[in-house]
Image (spheres, helix red, strand yellow):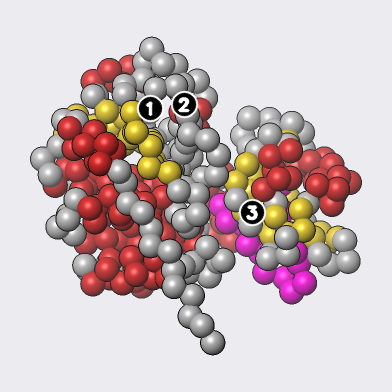
Amino acid sequence: MTLLSPQPLIGPDQRFMDLLLGAKRLLVMGHLHPDGDSVGSSVALTLALASLGREVTMGYYGRLGQHLHFLVESLPSCRLIKGDKSELNEYDLLVMVDCLHPDRIWDGFNDLAILPPRLIIDHHPGDPFKAGPLAVYHNHLVSSTGELVFKVLESLEIHWTRPMAESLLAAIMADTGFFSQNNTTPECFRQASVLIAAGARVEYVVSRLKRNWTQARVRLLRAALGALEISANGQVASVILTQAMLDEAGATMDDMEGFVEYPRSLAGVEVAALFRVDGRGRTRVSLRSGLGYSVKELAERYGGGGHRQAAAYTDPAADPAEARARFMAEAFLYLKPL
Ligand SMILES: [Mn+2]
């Protein structure tokens, strides 16, 4: 038996690091409705730069899930903004975290007139925003932006604090499904090992991310599972979440996070889908697949994107059931067997 030797993860180039360290006032922003990777990566980078004497603000637009609040609570000396465009000219560098394009930060954010010079650090597949980013650290083969931020902090020879270590551990855990997905590599575990040695508490991070359900969320899950549909000889399983279900459960948009994992956990299911109201009169569709199929191309066909095993798009239908019917009628034409 031969052991595969993992490809070492290449760190950021000198230009990226020079620009990052050359800035005095920085704004670190993740994508709209930031997820665990986006927030964890942004918080760790913000704390690290602040520890080097930089004036750093972390910001985001949209909702921050309740399960991620503990991450931003560790920003004692750094300001958190919730997206005020008027402040943008106060910064000499915008660091875009976990997104390749300013549109992912906020619709209309790519107005070059208001954007400060920027760095991009991301793992999503695709081409980075071309118009004027100063430097890009992009690798779509890694599990998470957290892994890339780790490399940045490692090359800074940062003095790790527990909040930095726990933020990055949360980022990597979030995007690897707690080290359970195909994108979990030896490098993920190497980094986790350093983070745990630096004081990250595994059980604390997992509890904060996973074991913090509200009763409304449990009621919503019960409703979602009531709407479970299994199709295509058991290979496709989906749930829908309508506004009526949210209202009935007394739940919020945050409470829908991660529900796609339930249809995904059924034996024999190759593709799992969650169809939910997006709060703007359309349906947001989250897709997950096993190792047999890629959902990336399908999501792209409908104007969305993502990774092979996890992708998403928006359907114009206001009723998630209608979006599900469309998906079931067409999906297998565009799913790509691997
Ligand atoms: Mn990510």
N-terminal label among 3 and 2 = 2
**What percent of the width, then of the height, locates residue 107?**
52, 25
Contact flag, marks 1 and 2 (Cβ < 8 Å): yes
* Residue 193 forms part of the magenta stretch: no
Q: Which mark is residue 117?
A: none
In this view of the protein, which residue sits in the foreground, 311 or 81? Answer: 311
Q: Which residue is mark 1?
A: 133
Mark 3 vs mark 2, foreground winner is 2
Q: CA distance from mark 1 to mark 2?
A: 6 Å
- Which residue lies at the image location 70% right of the left edge and 51% below the top edge? 295
Contact flag, marks 3 and 2 (Cβ < 8 Å): no
**What percent of the width, then of the height, locates residue 216?**
56, 55
**What percent of the width, then of the height, locates residue 251?**
57, 48
Q: Residues within 10 Å of mark 3 (few under 14, many from 20)?
A: many
Q: Which residue is mark 3?
A: 308
User: Can the viewer see residue 4?
Assistant: yes
Element type where label 1 sits in the image: strand
Q: Which residue is mark 2?
A: 130
Contact flag, marks 3 and 1 (Cβ < 8 Å): no
Q: Is residue 180 left or right of residue 64?
A: right
Residue type, mark 2 in image: Lys
Residue type, mark 3 in image: Arg
Highlighted magenta segment, given as a residue range? 257-275
- Which residue lies at the image location 36% right of the left edge and 54% below the top edge? 10
Q: Residue furthest left?
A: 53
Q: Quadrant of the C terminus?
A: bottom right
